[in-house]
Image: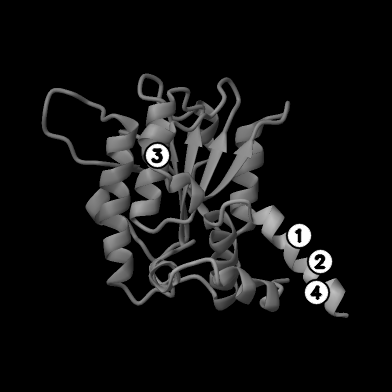
Amino acid sequence: MIDQKLLNYLEGFLTDNRKSLFKKVLEKRTRHFAVVLEDIFQPHNASAVIRTADIFGVQDVHAIENKYTNKVSRHVAKGSQKWITSKRYKSDGNNTKICLDNLRENGYQIIATSPHNESCLLHDFDVTKKSAFVFGVEAEGVSEFVKEQADGFLKIPMVGFTESLNISVAAAIILQDLTTKLRDSDVNWQLSPEEKDNLYYEWVKKTIKNVDEIEKHYHQKIEQEI
């Protein structure tokens, strides 16, 4: 539950332009789509995808860590990791299964990005369904488990000799195309008022330096007034 009085106090440390930007960005944010990174071991690739998700308004990125640790390169991410909701799956169990089960419980269909023979071409994809797009490493692609569990496959049409794209390039092409179609559709793709409020509160706190000390001072002040 958001402490509205505390939020009002913290907003005093932000410019009007910053507060306005937060609210403007939140109007374009969506959880209708989600991104899943399966065992991406190169920090620059994972970071570029996070940056892409932020740019095109996709709020949630799920990182599966079976063999490799998902690391973020601040140089590549350009701070985008602050505004994205990331969830890491790194237990000793089948992290891929845990992630996919979690997504399905939240209403997502699982779409593996792969040049699979039965893949749906990007321009034919149905954006009305809540979808989580799984990206795997370049050489191997998504795991066999993802292929077995996927509700569908998605591929980018290619006409050259090379049969694959860098993961960050593929994610950018897919998210740009599908989020544009989504916003032009009749789908209710925006965040709920509660989700917007919660994210706004998080972003305000992440923007303020030494926010913990400021909160502590605020609570001490309130106690003294009582």
| Residue 2: image location, x then y, percent | 69, 72
Mark closer to the chain start, 2 or 3: 3
Three-letter code, disc 3 = Ala
Q: Residues within 10 Å of mark 3 (few under 14, many from 20)?
A: many
Name the residue that disc number 1 marks: 216
Tag nearer the camera, 3 or 4? 4
| Residue 56: image location, x then y, percent | 34, 56
Tag nearer the camera, 2 or 3? 2
Q: Residue 174 versus residue 76: which sits nearer the camera?
A: 76
Q: Residue extending furthest left? A: 160
Three-letter code, disc 2 = Gln
Name the residue that disc number 4 marks: 222
Mark closer to the chain start, 1 or 3: 3
Q: Residue 39 versus residue 19: which sits nearer the camera?
A: 19
| Residue 174: image location, x then y, percent | 30, 47
Q: Is residue 26 above or below residue 172?
A: below
Name the residue that disc number 3 marks: 77
From the viewer's perspective, tell me whether residue 218 is left or right of residue 224: left
Name the residue that disc number 2 marks: 220
Mark closer to the chain start, 3 or 4: 3
Mark closer to the chain start, 1 or 4: 1
From the viewer's perspective, tell me whether residue 205 is left or right of residue 80: right
Whole-Å distance between the Cαs marked 1 and 4?
10 Å
Position of the N terminus, as image quadrant, is: bottom right
Numbered disc 3: secondary structure: helix
Three-letter code, disc 1 = Lys
Colour theme:
one colour
Instruction: Kindly check if marks 2 and 4 are in contact, taking CB atoms under 8 A apart as contact.
Output: yes
